[in-house]
Amino acid sequence: MAALGLDPGEFVSADEDDGYPSGADGDPESGGLLPAPVLAVVGRPNVGKSTLVNRLIGRREAVVQDIPGVTRDRIAYDALWNGRRFTLVDTGGWEPDATGLQAAVAAQAEMAIQTADAVLLVVDASVGATATDEAVARVLRRSDRPVLLAATKVDDDRLTSDTAALWRLGLGEPHPVSGLHGRGSGDLLDAVLDALPESPRDLPGTGVGGPRRVALVGKPNVGKSSLLNRVSGEVRSVVHDVAGTTVDPVDSLVDLDGEVWRFVDTAGLRKRVHMASGMEYYASLRTRAAIEAAEVAVVLIDASEPIAEQDQRVIGMAEEAGRALVLVFNKWDLVDEDRRLAMKRELERDLVRVQWAERVNVSALTGRSVAKIAPALRTALASWDRRIPTGRLNGWLAEVIAATPPPVRSGKQPKVLFATQAQTRPPTFVLFTSGFLEAGYRRFLERRLREEFGFTGSPVRISVRVREKRGRKS
């Protein structure tokens, strides 16, 4: 800008919140750390597993509510104790003889044990060992994993002596702990580190820098967990015809089209966050956090039904977060010719603001076109990472403005003096001008940017910096 005789101090923002970066380029953390050993936390419903998990990881991540069965899938959290990292996997209530939805939850707990390096069985010390606890202990005694026993809800000395009765489970010394108050949690963590190996049993090859992070979002019952199970090739998330089965975000490393991706299956957004309550409120917050922590959002939409307000709201969340975007229309096996025509009208009417998003029509049930998701993710992320050289950008901009000048404002036509790409992820462009540019003209420039440079699947942000008028010198 110095070569053009421009002083950066002469410019002020034309937008109250224009997205112009105040510091670093906003790149997310690399995620390139080596894999950590895994501890699976299991136990029957409502013994306080998620409360204990929050205490052990030192932050409130797992959804907690005073009713049984809130946690259903297996959810992984990063933990750190005495300088050692490990992954802690929270599971739903495990009942070996369960049926229906609870049987699917129990299957997730059993799979967590099979993929863990050590297991922590949680028992409610205020109740003592139940028949279910004894059945779970019998299964764990047959496994080849180290097993620790935690007696929870030991909030004071009165219950400490009662934990001795848990020796009869045959899993060694019970560790009295209070997930609510933190009593005994340090001793338990020391025992966990002693039981865990230095490195996990399996080290999946995820490449340098770690896998790209994908948030799988959408309204309840559109098939997010079914799609995750389809692309992963295993039952990774609990699937049931009851809407809202998933509560916590569920992380999965998925090998898709020869590349490892980190998929996060999230709870369906049923209500606006300020209208939700209880576990639904915390699930909504975690879904929003999952989008913000991801690099690309896959918004799943039920193709067999009209596009709903919730669908548009989820898309808006991903767009506002500045994430790359892929729209996946699921249940395509249920779409007939009439529905295709109706959907075309809905796309033109309801999703006009995200015409740039990648679109894929799939069926999680039959596997139709699921293989097309990976190329769509790569296209969207390539656009999200794209940077345009400043010289090329200004040369192109001069041609566009010469052909279509900005509209006159207050009797004067604003001039675009200089342009630069301030950051990637998402691509953000700053225009230094002599006057304010109308929103319509900025949309015109965005449309021409996309036509010239691509940016398919990524939001593009354009902000304006207006040169201040110099005051007369006295």
Image: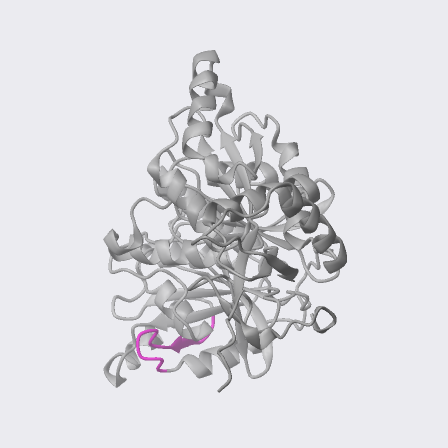
Coloring applied to the structure: one colour
Question: Residue sitting at 43 percent across and 13 percent down?
Answer: 338
Relative to 420, 474 lies left or right: left
Question: Residue sitting at 56 percent across and 74 percent down?
Answer: 10
Q: Which of these two is toward me, 421 or 93?
A: 421
Residue 115 at x, y = what percent?
59, 55
Q: Which of these two is toward me, 458 or 410?
A: 410
Relative to 402, 125 lies left or right: left
Furthest-top residue in this view: 337
Asked if residue 401 is positioned above or below residue 153 in the image, the reply reads: above
- Over which residues does the magenta segment extend? 172-183
Residue 365 at x, y = what percent?
52, 28
One can see residue 233 in this view: no
Relative to 213, 133 lies left or right: left
Q: Which of these two is toward me, 238 or 332?
A: 332
Residue 188 at x, y = what percent?
46, 78
Question: Residue sitting at 57 percent across and 70 percent down?
Answer: 86
Magenta span: chief secondary structure: loop
Furthest-front residue in this view: 474
Question: Residue sitting at 71 percent across and 62 percent down?
Answer: 209
Q: Is residue 473 magenta?
A: no
In which quadrant is the N terminus drawn?
Answer: bottom right
Q: Quadrant of residue 67?
A: bottom left
Relative to 445, 340 lies left or right: left
Residue 260 at x, y = what percent?
68, 49
Q: Quadrant of residue 219?
A: top left
